[in-house]
Image (cartoon, coloured by chain):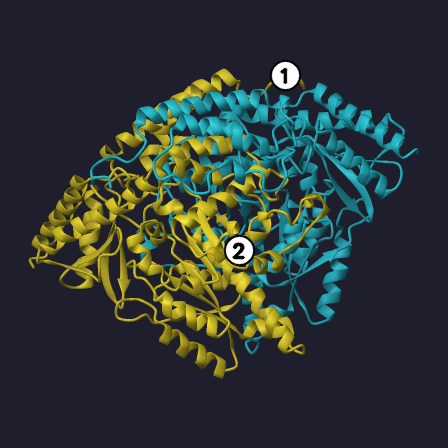
Chain colours: A cyan, B yellow
Amino acid sequence: MAKWNESIDMEAPQFKDFAKTMTDFIAEYLENIRDRRVLPTVQPGYLRPLIPEEAPEKPDQWQDVMADIERVIMPGVTHWHSPKFHAYFPTANSYPAIVADMLSGAIACIGFTWIASPACTELEVEMLNWLGKMIDLPKEFLACSGGKGGGVIQGTASEATLVALLGAKARTMEKVKAEHPDWDESTIRSKLVGYCSAQAHSSVERAGLLGGVQLRLIKADSENRLRGEALEDAIKEDIAAGKIPFYVVATLGTTNSCAFDYLDEIGPVGNKYNVWVHVDAAYAGSAFICPEYRHYMKGIETADSFNFNPHKWMLVNFDCSAMWLKEPEWVVNAFNVDPLYLKHDQQGAAPDYRHWQIPLGRRFRALKLWFVLRLYGVENLQAHIRRHCGFAKQFADLCSNDERFEIIGKVQMGLVCFRLKGSNELNEKLLKRINGRGKIHMVPSKINDVYFIRMAVCSRFTVSEDMVYSWTEVSAAADEELLTNGN
Amino acid sequence: MAKWNESIDMEAPQFKDFAKTMTDFIAEYLENIRDRRVLPTVQPGYLRPLIPEEAPEKPDQWQDVMADIERVIMPGVTHWHSPKFHAYFPTANSYPAIVADMLSGAIACIGFTWIASPACTELEVEMLNWLGKMIDLPKEFLACSGGKGGGVIQGTASEATLVALLGAKARTMEKVKAEHPDWDESTIRSKLVGYCSAQAHSSVERAGLLGGVQLRLIKADSENRLRGEALEDAIKEDIAAGKIPFYVVATLGTTNSCAFDYLDEIGPVGNKYNVWVHVDAAYAGSAFICPEYRHYMKGIETADSFNFNPHKWMLVNFDCSAMWLKEPEWVVNAFNVDPLYLKHDQQGAAPDYRHWQIPLGRRFRALKLWFVLRLYGVENLQAHIRRHCGFAKQFADLCSNDERFEIIGKVQMGLVCFRLKGSNELNEKLLKRINGRGKIHMVPSKINDVYFIRMAVCSRFTVSEDMVYSWTEVSAAADEELLTNGN
C-alpha cells in the first residue's frame, strides 16, 4: 500500500509525453481517415479475447496503451468522420473542439449551480446568446434581451424534447388544476395528449413513453411535412373526446428525409389551443446560420422552445445540443428540489442550470462552442454548411443522370434519398451490397412503405472527388445487383 | 465564400501546436492549482463585459483564445481539484482520463447501436465486467457470466436512478395489468408508490417527479440509515390503502453525511413485496474496490440494479456513472422504439445501449475507464481511496482535539461532518466566514434541524499538510467568529 503522501498518479512530465503522442496520433488518424475501411468487419464479441479478463493490479505503461489503440480499438471502429461515411446524420468533430474539451477535462468542474463554477454557467449563457443571434432567433428566446427567456446546452436533442415535454406538462397541469380544482393529478395526466408528425424522430415518441403521456403521431402531407390543418383536426377531435392537448413537436429537417414541417401553420394552431410548441431542428438547425435557409424557420416567434445540435452539423464535438426556452420557469419550477448542500447566496441572479435538465451534473461544454465559434468564425461555419449542401446536389445530379435510379422527394441540406427503380426488396439487396463492398457506408429509411437509401454528407474532410467516389460505388453495386438478379 | 474544395478548417500542424500548448497549460494549471484562490470572487454577470457581444465573422487566432483562458475563464472558475476544495463530493480528474477523452473526441462516434461503432459498445461491456469484478459484484449483474445481466455507463447517478425507476415501473405495470386486465394504465400508474430514505439524494425525489409517480420519503434511524422495518411498515400501510409499491432506492453513502442504508434489510423486504431494489452508491461505491469496505454492500445479491460513479472518486473524469442491471430487458423493452435507420443485422448479439438510457446519443466513454484502470492499476486506485479515508480521519482528529467543536455522526469514507458546539446560526456564520476568507471551500448540510459543515476530501493532490492547513483555517475562522460574537 502506498504511503499517504506518496503520489500514485501519473506525473506531469509523463502526461505531457502521453498527451503529445496522442495529439500526433489524432492528427495522423483524422488526416488519413479516408484510407481506413469505413465500416468494420468484426463480429459481435470480437473484443473480449483481445484484452485480459480483469483489470491489472499494477499499472501498465502508457506506451502499451497507445499501442493497443490500433490492436484493440481501431478494428472495431466505424469511422464517422471518413468522407465515405454517409449513414444517419453527421456528428461533429473539429480540432478546436477537441482542444476545448481537453481544457474542460482539466478544469473538470460540475456546473450544476452558478457558484459551483461561475465561468461554466456564464460562458454558456453568453454562447447561447452568440448562437441565437447567429440564427436570428427572436429576442424573447435570448437571455441578453433581459426578458425571461434563455438558452442552455443539453446533451442530446432527445433530452431537449423530453425537457420541453415536461415543461409543457407542468404548464398545462397548473392551468387545468386551476380550472378544475376537483380533478386529481392522475386524472389530468391521463387526459393529456401531445402531437408530432409520423415523420418525427423516434426520440419524440420515446419522450412520450418516458414522460408517461400519450403522444399522437399525425400523418404528414405528400411531401412528408406536417401541416397546421392536420394538427388542428387532431386537436379538435381530442378535445371533443375529453382529452387535453398540451404539446406539439414541429420538426425542421426530419431524420427520414430532411422534410420541414410547416412551423408557420403549426405554431399558430399551438398558440390558439394553449399547446406548447417545441421545434426540433436537431440536424438542419445549423443551416440557419446561413440567411438563405432561414425561411424554414418562418413562424419561430410562435414557438415556446427551440433546439438544434451544433454537435451534428456545426463542428462542435458531441455533446452540445443547444436549446432555448421563452419561459424556462416552467421547467425550472417543475423539478426544483433544492437541498441545503446545493443552495448558495447568489441564487436567482444567474441560472442554476441543474434545474433546466434531466441530470444533475454537467460538464463545462460551453468551452467547445466558444473555441469553435472563434476559431472558425461565422464565415467559415457558413462555408461548411454551404459546401455540404453543394456536395449533396452534386451527388443527386450524378444519381439523376443514371436512369436506373430515382431521387425520393427533394434534396434537402446535405441529404439525398434515392433508390433503384424497382421493388423494396431490390433496394434492400442493393444496400446490403453497398455496405458489404466495404468502401462506403449508408443506412436506409422507409416512408409510406417505400424503402430507400439515405446518402448524408457527414465529414468535414469531404471534397467533390469523394462524391464521385461514393456515387461510383453505388453505381458499381447496382451493376452487380442487377446482373446477379438478371433484371 | 470559400470554394467547395478549399479547407476552412484549422490545419493539422496548427492543431498540434495548439493541443501541445494546451497540454502544457493543463499540467501547469493542475500541478500548481493549490496556489489559486479556490472560490472565485466574481459577481453574477462578470463574464459578459469581457467578451464581444457576437461571434466573430472571421476566425480568431488560437493564441488569442489561449490567452483569454486566464483573462475570461479562470477568474470565474471554482477550482474543484484544489486540495482546498472540500465542497459537495469529489469529482474525478486524472491525466490518463484526459488523454482518453482526447481519443474519444477524435473518434467521435455515436455509440447508439453496436454497428455504429462495435468497439464503443464492446469496450463498455468489458470495462463494466472489469469494474464489476473489482468490487466483487454478484455474477448475476455481469455480462461475462453469460446470463441476462450487464453493465452500462450512464451520464450521472440521477439518470441511473431514473432509468431504474422506469424499469421498475414497466415491470410492475406488466404484472398488475396481467392481474387486473380491466384496469387502465393511468389507473395503475396513479397507484404506484416508490420509496427512499429521507436522507437520499435530491435526485431520487426528482426521478419520481420526472417519472410522474409518487415517491415516499421514509425516516431513517438515529444514525441516518434506512432500516428494513421502516420500509416494510410503509409498504404494508400503502398496500392496505390500495396502493402498489414498485421501487425502492437504498443509498450507500448519503450526500448529507455518508450514511449507509441497511441494504441487507431493505433488499429482502423489496424482494418479498416484488419491489425493484435500486442501490445508489454514487460516491462511496468506489471504496468497494477495497475489500475492507465491502461489508457495506451486504445484501447486494437482493438488488435489481446497482450504480456508482467512477467519475466521483475513482479518477475517471465526468461523465462516467457505472450501472449494472440483473434484468436490463425491463428497461430495454419499455422504451424500445426501433426505426429502420437504426436497425442493423447484428441486433440481439450485443447490447444496443440506446435502449439502456434516456438520451439516444452517447460518446465513447469506456476509453476513460480503460485508460484509468490500466494506467493506475487496481493497487493504486485502492491506495487513492485509502489515502482519502485516512485524510478524513486526520481532519476529524484535529477537530476532536478542539473542544469548541463536535463531530456529527461517524466519520465515513472521505467525509467529516462537524460543527461548533452552539446554535445553527453560529455555525451558519462560521461557514460564511470560512468561505469568505477565501482559503478553503466547504458547504453545509442539515439533518433533523441540526445545521453542520461538511469537509469532503476531494483532490488527488491532497497531502497530509493540506488537512492541517484546512483545519487551521476552520479554527482561525472560529476564533474570529467567537471573538466577534463575544461568546
Q: Residue B2 at what x, y percent from top left?
A: 63, 18
Vertical side of A242 occupied by A424: above or below? above
Mark 1 residue element: loop
The residue that disc 1 covers is B6
Task: Report the residue at 60% width, 36% height from top.
Answer: A312
Above or below, comparing residue B224 to residue A1 in the picture: below
For the point 79% across and 46% down, the residue is A447
Q: Chain of mark 2?
A: B
The foreground one among A396 and B477 is A396
> What SS does tag 2 mark?
loop
Where is residue B476 drawn, in percent x and y?
11, 47
Residue matched to label 2: B149
Q: Nearer the viewer, mark 2 or mark 1?
A: 2
Left or right: B344, with A363 as reference point: right
The residue nearer to you, when weighing B450 against A23, is A23
Q: Nearer the viewer, residue B293 or B21?
A: B293
- Image position of B312 (left or right of A174): left
Say if B462 sits above or below B324 in the image. Answer: above
Report crowding for label 1: few under 14, some 14 to 19, many 20 or more residues within 10 A (C-alpha): few
Which label sits on residue A265?
Answer: none
The residue lying furthest to the right in this view is: A487
| Cβ–Cβ under 8 Å for marks 2 and 1 | no
- Which residue is located at x 67 percent, y 50 percent? A202
- Check the picture and name the quadrant holding the C terminus of chain B: bottom left
Quadrant holding the N terminus of chain B: top right
CA separation in Å, label 2 and label 1 = 50 Å
Front-most of B22 and B467?
A: B467
Q: Position of residue A142 (x, y in %)?
A: 51, 43
Q: Are marks 2 and 1 on the same chain?
A: yes
Count of marks placed on residues: 2
